Image (cartoon, rainbow, N blue to C red):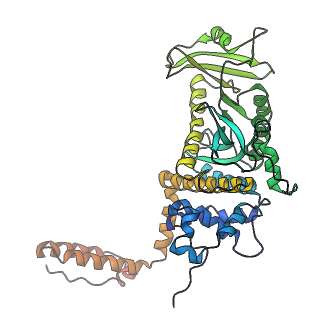
Amino acid sequence: MITKKVQNNQLPREIKAKFDELGILKHLRQAGITKAFGFSCGYLFQLVFCLVFRRKNWYRLLNSPKAVDLPGKDTVYRFLNHPKFAWRRFLLSLSTATIQKVSRLTDTQHTKVLILDDSSFYRDRSKQVELLARCFDHAKQTYFKGYRMLTLGWSDGTTFLPVDFSLLSSEKAAINGIQSTIDKRCSGYKRRIEALQTAPVQIPAMVERALSKGIQASYVLMDSWFTQQPLVKALTHQGLNVIGMVKATNQRYQVGGQLVGLKSLFRLALPVTGQKGVLRSIRTTLANGIPVKVVFVQNRHQRDRWLALLSTDCTLTAREIIRIYGMRWDIELFFKATKSFLKLQKEFQGRSYDLLISHTTIVFTRFILLAWQNRCSSDERTLGGMFYELCDEMSELDWAVALTQLLDLLHEALAGTKNTIKKWITCQLQQWIDRLPSYIKAYLPELSCES
């Protein structure tokens, strides 16, 4: 009789251990993502979660021989399109728990940061997708149909974990609006309203949610698109320092009672000697009264130009500001990994805004699990847990049985050696046994040794 496999045994063996260690299904239940009947949300979540590891999409999986035991197409889409599931609460809870695990492996004096950035979320072939908008891609300098994926992440310089995100649409360039049938009391409607807000309006709330969960960070790293005076002031009032790149815009700095631009500030800054790549540095004050330190570094791609880094922590040296800002690159690698390898924006092609949110959250969960698995396999400090598990396993084995087995293995190894070497080793072993206490010697066999 072959017992039927339970629904939870569908994850690959290499991933299931970390899936259970992070308690992903527990966080799913705590976020209220449950069903009253039918296939459980945990089962459907795992089904979508492991699609990328099977190297199949949902359509190919339904056409495979395994489709007999799988739920129908509508079951999965109803799960992903559900507007009342609190996906943000789930992601924030899972990220916070994982960050606590990672923090145990990180030195207390090591810099921990929050990173903010946005990325293009393409839906060029779509026409009827909810809240679809015409957005501008600054990297390619072209317009596209889709969203801007505003993302908040945490990093300790080694491991990056996504904490929160928002798929931004646009009121002015919107192609489609909000569904009229959506319940205005559910979390799905609230996220739709947030999608029509600008990024500077949403960022303080995202940071506040992360800090309220207990996520610890000293700095917020931003690109030049977000390093603006109102946002810098809002984040400093939350108790965080800001490090970001600034460009020559209308933003002004107070120097000697005058308001000057960034190019004028470069001419007023004192040159820095003895530090390769660092050109100038100056302490100044933003027009809204926030004291900052601006460091001018050489542009590696255009040697005749410079880049400016702003820090609200004026006690940092120029090298420290550059080093900490370099951690911002982790979020760019995150965007690359989720889009190229984890099937973000490609795996499901629904028209509902809820499906975009739920699937993006599942993709972020894949990255969190892989990031924790990579940290456990690469960080030597995680070997401590393996050591204690090995000790527990060895303690369950009787020492007398283990020692007897060891002697038997030695006899087998000596069977193929020369008689002279075998006699010498046997005599040495018998002399060692004779010196042991009597209560130990009683458990060991007597060895015959010819002198």
Give residue 259's quadrant in the image. Answer: top right
Residue in the picture at 20% in, 83% down? 448
Give residue 270's quadrant in the image. Answer: top right
Q: Residue furthest bottom?
A: 1
Q: Against 294, is 130 above or below?
A: below
**Nearer to me, 436 or 4:** 4
Relative side of 249 to 376, left or right: right
Give residue 115's quadrant in the image. Answer: top right
**Coordinates of residue 207 in the picture (x, y in percent):** 75, 41
**Coordinates of residue 295 in the picture (x, y in percent):** 62, 20
Residue in the picture at 40% in, 80% down? 400
Relative side of 399 to 42, left or right: left
Q: Residue furthest front?
A: 127
Q: Residue furthest right?
A: 185
Q: Against 262, is 144 above or below?
A: below
Count up the numbered dots. 0
Quadrant assignment for the C terminus: bottom left
Residue 5 seen in render = yes
Q: Against 34, is 321 above or below?
A: above
**Nearer to me, 364 or 125:** 125
Residue 113 seen in render = no
Residue in the picture at 64% in, 57% down? 362
Residue in the picture at 74% in, 26% down? 228
**Coordinates of residue 97 in the picture (x, y in percent):** 67, 55
